[in-house]
Image: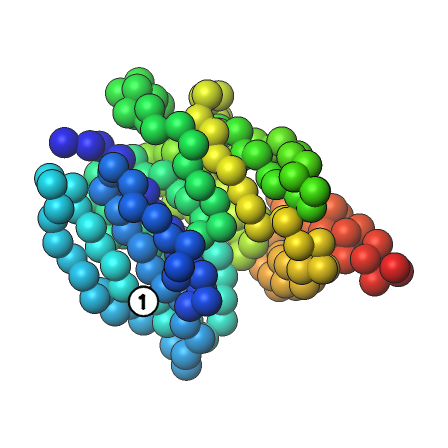
């Protein structure tokens, strides 16, 4: 049996982007409400793999809080976080879980306009006991991340007109969290986000 659960959250309009994977799978749709709440719609086993689908209602959206709520429904030692607009290209995740380390970096192929790729790294495979911190640009709360050959394709940057909207959303969340005052990573992401936001405003 797989020791990994893929965990995804998505907005209602992104539901069609969710794909099946040969792992345990937890998927939650996020819906604005008057408080945080969780509704499980499907909780079943298929071919020896656990499948959980439902909705997370929120009053004030925070990526860390929503992701932490979703991964509570993963019963495996490891979780693999995948956004709705991402595709997992390599599937040999178990070999890293067997190493027993806390967290792992994957390579993200960010698809931009004109089929141009920009490469970045992200922590996506980690022990379920580790929680996220950060209202936006959230990271698992651990210090050391080990490199892997896992590849993800990210399609969310194909439309440049949405960059400013995403940057402003994330900037506002980072500022609201206050983490940029004492967290170097959050400060870096806020700087990058503000630069992106104002560059596009100037066009």
Instruction: In the rendered view, tell whether residue 86 sits above or below residue 105.
Output: below
Instruction: In the rendered view, tell whether residue 71 sits above or below residue 123.
Output: below
Q: As drawn, which residue projects farthest toward the bottom?
A: 34
Colour mode?
rainbow
- Residue lying at 46% horizontally and 67% vertically, measured from the top left: 13
Q: Is residue 36 visible?
A: no
**Which quarter of the figure has residue 167?**
bottom right
Q: Nearer the viewer, residue 115 or 175?
A: 115
Q: Position of residue 56 (x, y in %)?
A: 35, 66
Q: Which residue is mark 1?
A: 55
Q: Position of residue 203 (x, y in %)?
A: 88, 59
- Residue lying at 29% horizontally and 41% vertically, measured from the top left: 21
Q: Position of residue 101 (x, y in %)?
A: 35, 23
Q: Which secondary structure lies at badge 1?
A: strand
Q: As drawn, which residue projects farthest toward the front?
A: 114
Instruction: In the rendered view, tell whether residue 60 sits above or below residue 114.
Output: below
């Amino acid at each position: 049996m797989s020791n990994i659960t893929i965990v995804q959250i998505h907005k209602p309009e992104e539901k069609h982007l969710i794909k099946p994977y040969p792992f345990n799978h937890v998927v939650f749709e996020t819906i604005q409400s008057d408080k945080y709440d969780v509704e499980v719609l499907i909780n079943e086993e298929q071919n020896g793999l656990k499948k959980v689908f439902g909705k997370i209602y929120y009053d004030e959206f925070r990526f860390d809080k929503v992701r932490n709520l979703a991964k509570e429904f993963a019963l495996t030692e490891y979780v693999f976080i995948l956004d709705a607009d991402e595709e997992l290209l390599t599937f040999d995740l178990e070999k890293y879980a067997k190493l027993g380390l806390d967290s792992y970096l994957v390579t993200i192929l960010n698809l931009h306009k004109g089929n141009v790729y920009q490469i970045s790294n992200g922590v996506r495979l980690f022990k379920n006991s580790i929680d996220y911190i950060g209202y936006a640009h959230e990271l698992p709360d651990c210090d050391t991340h080990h490199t892997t050959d896992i590849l993800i394709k990210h399609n969310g940057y194909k439309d440049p007109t949405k960059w400013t909207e995403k940057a402003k959303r994330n900037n506002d969340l980072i500022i609201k969290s206050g983490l940029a005052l004492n967290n170097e990573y959050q400060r870096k992401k806020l700087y990058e986000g503000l630069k992106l936001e104002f560059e596009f405003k100037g066009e």
